[in-house]
Image: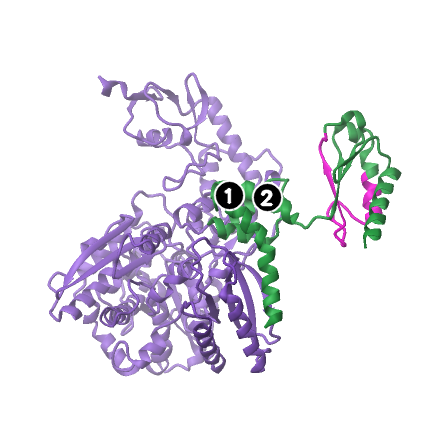
Amino acid sequence: MQETMETTQAMIDHLAAVNKILEKNNYSEARLIPILQEVQAVYKYLSKDMISYVATSIGVPPSRVYGVATFYAHFSLQPKGRHIIKLCDGTACHVKKSHGILNALYEKLNLSADKRTTDDLLFTIETVSCLGACGLAPVMVVDEDVYGQVTPEQACEVVDKLIAGEKAAK
Amino acid sequence: MSDAKNTLTVNNRVIEIAGERNLLELIRKAGIDIPTFCYHSELSIYGACRLCLVEVQGRGIMASCSTKPEPGMVIHTDTRAIREMRKINVELLLASHNRECPTCQRSANCTLQDLARKLGVKDVRYKQSTKGLPLDTSSPSLVRDPNKCVLCGDCVRVCAEVQTVGALDFAARGSNARVVPAFDNNLADVECVNCGQCAQVCPTGAIVAKSEVDKVWEAIYNPDKVVVVQVAPAVRVALGERFGFKTGENVARQMVTAMKMMGFDYVYDTCFAADMTIFEEATEFIDRLSNNGAMPMFTSCCPAWVKFAETFYPEFLPNVSTTRSPQAIFGVVARKTLPTKLGVKPENLVVVSVMPCTAKKYEAGLSKFTRDGRRDVDFVLTTVELASMIESMGIKLDELEPDTFDMPLGFSTGGGVIFGTTGGVMEAALRFAVEKVSGEPLQQIDFKETRGLAPRKEATLDVAGKTLRIAVVHGLGNARKLLEDIKAGRVQYDFVEVMACPGGCVAGGGQPITDEDNFRSKRAAGLYLTDKERQLQKPQDNFWIDKCYAESFGGRPGSHEAHTRLHTNYTNRNQIFDARSPIMHAKNDGAISICVTLCTRQKDCPGQRLLGRIVEYVKAQGLADQVNIEAAFSSRPEADGTIAVTVSDVIIPRNDSVEATFASVKQALDSALRK
């Protein structure tokens, strides 16, 4: 009895935040995109369960919500890491060899263009088209911190520091 | 004065504007056929295919489907620039389309093919860009071929707008854009009700009915098998269109000859089973009426409607008649009576149906319509599949000597015949029920209030001092509106007929695709004419059915034997998209599944305690190997706080008390285990 209650309560607690978001947006179909944005802000990504839950709650077919979620690059249907590394691959950064940094990070974290999040859910690597800081090219943004004129070695050092920090926290 | 102003010119001809919604309608009214691909008068305007281009002087080239007519416009429909653009657009569509035309089901009846020919496209200058994606063959009714999809969105719109199901939608964008069910799931795993309206509007072969033609030939050519076939009413008024007959002409007699030539041993009529359905359904209705049963009662002939109710409105399932559909009843009667009558071993009897419907394929495959490991109906063909079989034999349908259905399962009244159109089931049921309730012979057998294509048909009848309120809807969007009206208390009825396809079975997902105006009413008129010409029009006058009851089904409708064989139960499919947590997972295949829906908006939902009780009970009884338990989580705003539970396919009546619900769950579980 206790165990069952704990399982279901855990799911209900897990869904509590999305309930708040739905309520705030008045369960309105017209508010679908803001709802998805807020849900993703809380849960880091949009799971199937979450998309279904939002869809049935606001009375829109799940296929439509899935369509919206897959249309915008902003929405992720895959879980993301705790630290998000955004590497600029805009014209200026590209010319300044950003792909060398990307490959170094891929190698270090054992990732690829198809697999962008580490198995321990610590890191996700994303490429973006321009961060608007072309004077600092090549540019990397890790979480909230901006790094300019980065070399592959420096990029790996930043990652090392974060890993060390995670270990220390444990 | 104002009249004179309300005109525009098309290709130098003055045309009057008479309330047309867009230029396309107006130009077509003027007798010029503008090519279109994504435009359907019954759907919202999408403006994607860019084939309906016209030149509006002073404004340039625009899509006529999404331009409003304005007085004084000067329009040209056929300039050099337009001609070029249309051609290029069709070439681009063809470049992203798998052009295996000769082996496509839609070959010779394909909008894309037609347009390419009409516009004189002789060469595709662009590189073929199809990706060799896998086909979705998961559904028993439909096959999706993404390589033939040109993203016109017709299926998306008919499913969402007309049927309000929304099983398909666009996903991703750019070169990855595709039309898929939610989460790129298989069609069989989502809320698709198998109505096939998507296949009807698809202008290419990207969604087609799943063919069972080869399996049927296999059975016919097997010397050990006796193959019997039933043909649904709506088939006979549409089949002829493929062979040059007028739309709506009843070709049943030529069809029987053709089917005998093809090698079917006995050709029977689903209308017989339709008459029998009325015996059961109308008896059930009278019973509900006099014993305060769940009202209104809904008809249950249409498997797409039944799945719709199971998926979106499980609270109305107690209101859906438990009577099986005519196809299913025919299957039962055939399995029960034919082996002795025809001297066939039961395992050698093959039962085939020809239906105007794709959902009937799904219905025939349901495990509840199986007995002793044999399906009641082995194979289901659509009207189009039958037409292709006849064509492949080289038979000219219009030159055949007429023949008649085999007896006794080929005998029917007019009531059984009109089952194929919206309102027909209701009219047939009224012919039966009104006579039974009033106890007097029915003088006026036509109930014209049920006829026609109005979205909702209503009538109030006085029968033996009682008032009967009836309604008929067709198209699932209209059904949804009606259910919402009932829920909100805005309307009250005693008896409601629902057919999933607009127009009823005559316009079902398995019927020939036609661009003829008013094809629905023309086909319906064919059925009403047949009804008029019948000597017997009331289902209760079908004496073969009395005989059938006497010999095989307990002597009368509603008997114990009739109840076990001719009625069914329904499944709550409402939880397919709820967030779920597995609570207990059984190792055995075919375990009974219990699903408790918890309300996430209510503090301490009593469902949690109930779930705990069920888990304890299952463990204590040592049933852990035989029962799957899941929790589903829902926040539906209208959730009323009462507990929703299903045990296998039984929906537990809603009750606020955990104890009372637990007792019902226990009872349902025990009876499921006994099975």
The amino acid type, in three-letter code, at marker 1 is Asn
At 36% from the left edge and 30% from the top edge, which residue is drawn? B22
The chain letter corresponding to purple is B
The residue at which mark 1 appears reads as A25
> Looking at the rendering, which quadrant does residue B349 occupy?
bottom left
**Residue B663, position as x, y percentages in the image:** 45, 77
Which circle marks residue B590 in the picture?
none
Q: Is residue B469 magenta?
A: no
Q: Is residue B32 above or below residue A44?
A: above
Q: Residues within 10 Å of mark 2 (few under 14, many from 20)?
A: some
**Residue B660, position as x, y percentages in the image:** 43, 74
**Residue B20, position as x, y percentages in the image:** 32, 31
- In the image, are marks 2 and 1 on the same chain? yes
The chain letter corresponding to green is A
Q: Nearer the viewer, residue B277 or B417?
A: B277
- Parent chain of label 2: A
The residue at which mark 2 appears reads as A38
Q: Which residues are magenta?
A: A102-131
Q: Total label count?
A: 2
The answer for how far apart the CA atoms under marks 2 and 1 are is 10 Å
Verify CB contact (< 8 Å) between mark 2 and mark 1: yes
The amino acid type, in three-letter code, at marker 2 is Glu
At 17% from the left edge and 69% from the top edge, which residue is drawn? B437
Q: Nearer the viewer, residue B335 or B659?
A: B659
Q: Is residue B35 above or below residue B344?
A: above
